[in-house]
Structure formats: structure tokens, C-alpha cells
Image (cartoon, helix red, strand yellow):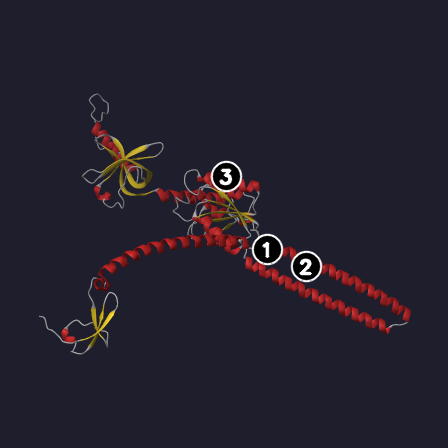
Amino acid sequence: MTSLFTPDSNDGRAVYSVSQLNQEVRLLLESAFPLLWVEGEISNFSRPSSGHCYFTLKDSGAQIRCAMFRSQAQHLRHAPKNGDQVLVRARISLYQARGDFQLIVEHMEDAGDGALKRAFEQLKVKLQAQGLFDAAHKKPLPALPKRLGVITSPTGAAIQDVLTVLKRRFPALSVLIYPVPVQGAGSAEQIADAIRLASERNEVDMLLLTRGGGSLEDLWSFNEEGVARAIFDCQLPLVSAVGHEVDFTIADFVADQRAATPSAAAELISPDSHAWLAGIEQQEQRLAQAMRRQLDRHSERIGWLRRHLDQHHPRRRLLDATQRLDELEARLQQAQQRRLRELELRQQNATQRLQRQNPQLRISQLETQRGELGRRLNLAMRHQLQKHGHTLQALAAELNAISPLATLARGYSVVRHEASGSVIKSHREVRVGEPVRAELAEGVLHCRVEFIEDQK
């Protein structure tokens, strides 16, 4: 680059002034670097009355001064503050007055999610290239698991959803919970340790790794490489159900199967107990039909043998054959009886297993709980009745104070027409000789009007 200044050369040396040197460096920096993106954390942020923004952008190893002039700063969606992790589009420059190397920022955006998404994609590409997502490594899920291991937070909503679905579909499936934190510092390491521990103990038939929904940052523990490799090395079939249907994590790609939600995972894992009972009943019917067919075939065979013996003489041979037939019939009956006893024993064992899984115990517990709630309800009702009884007594006392009966008790009476029973309020409502009824505090007087006096 050609210099814009001609240095002084009094003694043959090229001498720059400080201003000339800083301007040369500024022009050199601004022409050598295009607009570029820089990510870092804001510190020393200030915004004077001019509207310009001045701050330092730093990472763990270095920092650089930044300036964002008012014309660009007025387009910011959120006010920057110290500690924000941001991504800026800027050009490199030099503040000539102090000789400070700086960035002139033209655009700023939050770098949190962007950084996480880039880290997610980078790890996804890396693990996919290493074969951790290949279908050849996926283990099939057991058709009838006896014990399920669940790796999740014991206090989260996800475990409640899973247990509710399992109780409805297949209550005989026992559940072992491996409690772990599902977000925050150190949670990824604890999740990976729980997966390895479950694989080493081999005390369950399969594993469910789950938690409820959240932001990308909330779910980040399931995007850590350590968790992914623990899932890949796990010897047990593992289902991942992290977040909602739209949420995908690295754990979902490595797991043997992925479910959209914790409830959907429970549906996927558990067999339908009603379908299994229907299948057992169908097998029992098929067995009974097969037994009847076998008995019919043997009966037909016996009848044929009898007819064959009747057609072949001499008598001795017939007697021998008859005796042999009787022996065969006895052995057949014994075999059939033994077979029937075996089938009855198998049916009894199956019935006992079903009875052990009978929800009657739970029903009894609920009955006890219902009785306790009824007792508490009765106590509450009695308390309310007493409370309202006191209120009623107070209201009755107030009502009695303004009752016309109290007026009667002070010596007054209510005069009514004998025929209609309506109250007489004026002398104009009666005639001389008309019967009337005077109601007193105690008793009633039946009277007749002798004369009418108008007292105005």
C-alpha cells in the first residue's frame, strides 16, 4: 500500500508523526479486512447521551474495544448489557486519538442459541461420521419387559406421565428409577454415569431416558458427547423421550428408539394387558378345541377297532384283541386324565399369577382412603352445620325483634275480616254488624262491630 504522507527527512531517516502513523495504520486495517463476524461477551458497556454504544468484547483469552454508532444502535431489538454473549458484524479500525485497536460494529445479535445450535450440528456430524447413529447398532426392544429402568428427575412431570400410562396399560411392569438432574451444571455427567451404572448392574430389561420439554439450553444435557457415548456403549435397549414432539437431541439419534413425549414412550414400551388377557383366553379356547378333536379322533379310532374285531374270528383271537383293546382304552384314559390334570395345573398356575397381579389390594387401599375422606367430610359438615346453626339463631333473634308477634306480646292485636282473614287497616273497610276477628298474643277474640267512630 502506498503511504499518503511523506515523512520528514532532515537527517535521511523517515520520521512519522504520531497522527500520521495512526492514520496510516487505520487505513491499512480498514482496507485489509472486510466485514467479519465476531463472537464474545460484553463488558464495560456504556451508552452516553450521544446514543453511541461503547463496550469491550472478550472471551477467555483476549478482549477488544468496540464502538457502535447511534445510526446502527437504534436498530437493536434489545438493550445490550454486561455479561451478554453476542455475535457482532463489524469492521476493523483504529481510534486515532488514542491509537486503540477497535471494532466498528454495524449489527449485533444474541449468540446464545446460535452457539448452541452450531455446537449441536458439529457434534451431530461428528458422531454420525463415527457410526453412532447407524441402524445396525440399534437393539430391539423386548416384547414383554418385566422391569423397566427410568433415568430422569424423580420430581419432574415426565416420570408422573410415564407411571400413569404404565399403570393404565400394564400395571404388572415394575419400574426402577435412576434419579438424576436433567438440566444444569454437572447434569450431563450424572446422566451418563446413571446409564453406565444401569448397564453394569443389568437389573432391568430396558431403559427409558426422559424429561419434559424446555428450551435448547434446558435440554442441552442430552446433547453432550459424554451422554451420547454412554448410550452407545449401553448393553441394554434404551428409548429416548426428551422434550416434546418438535424437540430433537443427540440422545434421540443414538438411542435404540426415540419417542416424541414421555407418555408416548410409555405407550411404546408397555404391552396392552387387555390384549394379552384376550390372547390367553383365545389360546385356552384353542387348546380346549384341540382336546375335543383329539378325543373325537380317539373315540372314532376305538369304534373302528371294535368293528374290525367283530369282523375277524376265531373267538380266541377276538377275546385277546378285546382284552388288548381294553388295556389300550385304559391307558388312553389314563393318558388323557394325566394330560387334563397337567392342563388344569397350568391353568391354576396361570390363575394364581393373575390373582397376584389383581388390583384388589389397591382397591382396598382406596376404600380405606375413601372412608377416611368420608370421616373428614362428616366432621367438616358437622362443623359447618354448627356454624350455620349459630348464624341461624342470631338471625332468628333479629327477626324476632322485628316480628309482629313481638308487637302482639306488648298488648296490641291484629284485626281481620272474619270471612276473608285480611287485615283491617281503616274503619272504612268494615260495616256495622260485620263479624271481625282480633288476634292477640294469646288467643283470638271473635267480635262484631257495634258502631264506627271516625277519629281524624
Q: Which residue is mark 2?
A: 344
Q: Residue at x 14, y 74 (%)?
A: 427
* Three-letter code for the amino acid on which mark 3 is drawn: Asp
Q: Is residue 312 above or below residue 348?
A: below
| Mark 3 and mark 2: Cα distance apart in space | 48 Å
Mark nearest the camera among 3 and 2 is 2
Q: How many marks?
A: 3
* Three-letter code for the amino acid on which mark 1 is drawn: Gln
Q: Residue at x 30, y 42 (%)?
A: 89
| 107 and 231: which is toward the camera | 231
Whichever of callouts 3 and 1 sits on the residue coming sooner in the sequence is: 3
| Mark 3 and mark 1: Cα distance apart in space | 38 Å
> Whole-percent x and y of residue 170?
54, 54
Image quarter for residue 113?
A: top left
* Three-letter code for the amino acid on which mark 2 is drawn: Glu
Left or right, 186 with respect to 29, comes to: right
Q: Is residue 419 above or below residue 116?
A: below
> Whole-percent x and y of residue 176?
52, 45
Q: Residues within 10 Å of mark 3 (few under 14, many from 20)?
A: some
Q: Residues within 10 Å of mark 2 (few under 14, many from 20)?
A: few
Q: Is residue 259 visible?
A: no
Q: Residue at x 21, y 44 (%)?
A: 71
Q: Which residue is mark 1?
A: 355
Q: Is residue 202 above or below residue 387?
A: above
Q: Residue at x 25, y 58 (%)?
A: 398
Q: Secondary structure at mark 3?
A: helix
Q: Is residue 104 visible?
A: yes
| 48 and 222: which is toward the camera | 222
Q: Which residue is mark 3?
A: 193
